[in-house]
Amino acid sequence: MGERLAPHRPGRDDLRALFPVLAQEVNGLPLVYLDNAATTQTPLPVLDAVRQFEQHDRANIHRGVHTLSQRATEAYDEARRTLARFIGAGAAHELVFTSGTTEALNLVVHGLSTAGAAPAVLQPGDEIIVSGLEHHANLVPWQQAARRCGAVLRILRPDAQGRLRAQDLAALLTPRTRVFAVTACANATGERPPFEALLAQAADAGALTVLDAAQAVAHSVIDLSSLACDFMAFSGHKMHGPMGTGVLAGRRVALERLEPLRYGGDMVAWVTETEASFADLPMRLEGGTPNVAGAVGLAAAASFVDRTGRERIDAHLSDLRRHAAEGLAALPGVTVLSPDTGLTAIVSFVVDGVHPHDIGTLLDEQGIALRTGFHCAQPLLEHLGRGPTARASFAMYNTYAEVERLLAGVAHALKVLQ
Ligand code: PLP
C-alpha cells in the first residue's frame, strides 16, 4: 500500500517510467498507446506484487493448514479488503472476484434468471430495462435471460446526441420492472450518463440496479456506498491490473439472491451424495480455485491508482480528451461523438467517406495505437446513425504531446485517404 508515498503525477516522465511497455518503438516511432478503453498497461508495482506472490506465497487458499496456504489465503483476503475500500463498499456490501466485467455481469444475469432452492427472481412478464449505451456484455446476457424467463427487455434509448434522459427512464419504469442496468461510461462514444440519478430513480421504482463500471474505475471515484446500486461490475485489465481479473460488488442482500454460476469446490458448506448446501458470500459465488495472483495484482493496481489520485487522473484525462475532441473536430469531415460529455477518457470519431480501419492502419504505421470498429456496442452506434468509429482512449500516463501526435497522425491519414 502506498498511501504515505508521494503521489505520482499523471502524464509525467517518472510515472511513465513505471510502465515499461510504453518505452518502445512501433514502426520506427515511439509508441503512443491510446487504446486504454480496451486494455490499460500495467505498472511495475503491480507486476512486482504478482511476482512476489508467485515466488513466495503461491498455494491454494482456504484448504491448507500449511504456511503457504495460509499466506495465500491472507493475501487473497487482503486483496478483497483493499478493493472494497477502493470502491467505497460498506458493511452492507460484498465483493466477489471474477475474471472480468463480462463474467461479473453474467453472474448477475444467470443468478437472477435461474431457479435454485428458491424460484428465479425473474419471472414471466417481468421487465428488464437496459440502457442503449451498453457494451454487448451488458446487453446480450439480458437478451438471453429475457428469452429464457419470458421476461420483457426494454431499452432506454439515448437521444440523438447519445445522452440518456431521466424522463425517458420514467416512461419505461413500471411495477413489473425488476432490473435496470446502465454503464458509468459508454465505451463506444465516451458518453458519461448521469448514472447516479438514473440508478436512484430505478431503485425508487423498486428495480434491482446494475452498474457497469468498466470504463470508470481506472480514473473516477466510484463510491458504492453513496450509490443506489445493487450490483457493480468492473475489469482489472482496464484499471492497470492483470488480465483475467475483475469484480462483482454490491449489496449483500442482492448478491444473496443470485443462484451461483459455478458449483463445485470452495463454494459449499456441506455435501452429501444427493445434495449440497452453499457457503456464505463471497465464496458462494466463487466456486473453484480463484485467480489469487490476479487478485493480488488487482489490489496493487487499485493502490497504484489511489497513489496517483483519482481526482488528479480524472482532471488530466478530461484535459486530454477536451484537447483531442477539439482538435479532431477541427479536421475536415471529422465528427466527434458525444463532444461535450462530462469527465471521460474516451474520444470516438467518424470521418465522412473514410473507413475507420484505414485510419487505424495509417496511425499504426506512425506508432499510434487506437481502436476501430463497433467497440462491442453495435446497437448504440446504429441507433446514432453511425457505423464503426475510430476511438482514442487515454490513461494516466498519456501526455498532451501524445494528443498532438494523434491529431497530426489523423490529419496525415486524412490527406492520404480523402
Ligand atoms: N463493459 C464495458 C463498458 C466495456 O468497455 C467492456 C470492455 O471493453 C466490457 C464491459 C467487457 O469487459 P471485459 O472484456 O473485461 O469483460
Image: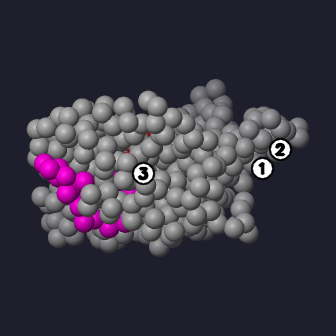
Query: Looking at the rendering, which quadrant does residue 177 occupy?
Result: bottom left
Q: Residue at x 19, y 45 (%)?
A: 350
- For residue 70, which numbered disc appears in the image? 2
Circle number at residue 402: 3
Crowding around mark 2 (Cα neighbors within 10 Å: few <14, some 14 to 19, many 20+) is some
Comparing 349 with 161, the one in front is 349
Q: For residue 85, what is the image quadrant?
A: bottom right
Q: Residue at x 27, y 44 (%)?
A: 410
Mark 2 vs mark 3: give the one in front. 3
* Residue 369 in the figure: left or right of residue 396: left
Q: Residue at position x 59%, y 28% from top?
A: 274
- N-term-proximal mark, 2 vs 3: 2
> Residue shown at 83%/38% (left/top)?
56
Q: Nearer the viewer, residue 351 or 171?
A: 351
**Which of the numbered marks, if any, corresponds to residue 74?**
1
Query: Which secondary structure is most common in the magenta stretch?
Result: loop
State which quarter of the image contains the N terminus. bottom right
Residue at mark 2 to residue at mark 3: CA–CA distance: 46 Å
Residue kind at label 2, given as amino acid type: Gln
Residues at circles 2 and 1 in contact by the CB criterion of under 8 Å: yes
Q: What is the x, y in percent for residue 291?
A: 64, 37
**Is residue 64 left or right of 115 when viewed as pictured?**
right
Residue 15: x percent and y percent? 61, 55
Q: Nearer the viewer, residue 368 or 300?
A: 368
Residue 354 x/y as whole percent: 16, 37
31 vs 151, left or right, is: right
> What is the magenta range?
328-346
The amino acid type of the residue labelled 3 equals Glu
Give the foreground label among 3 and 1.
3
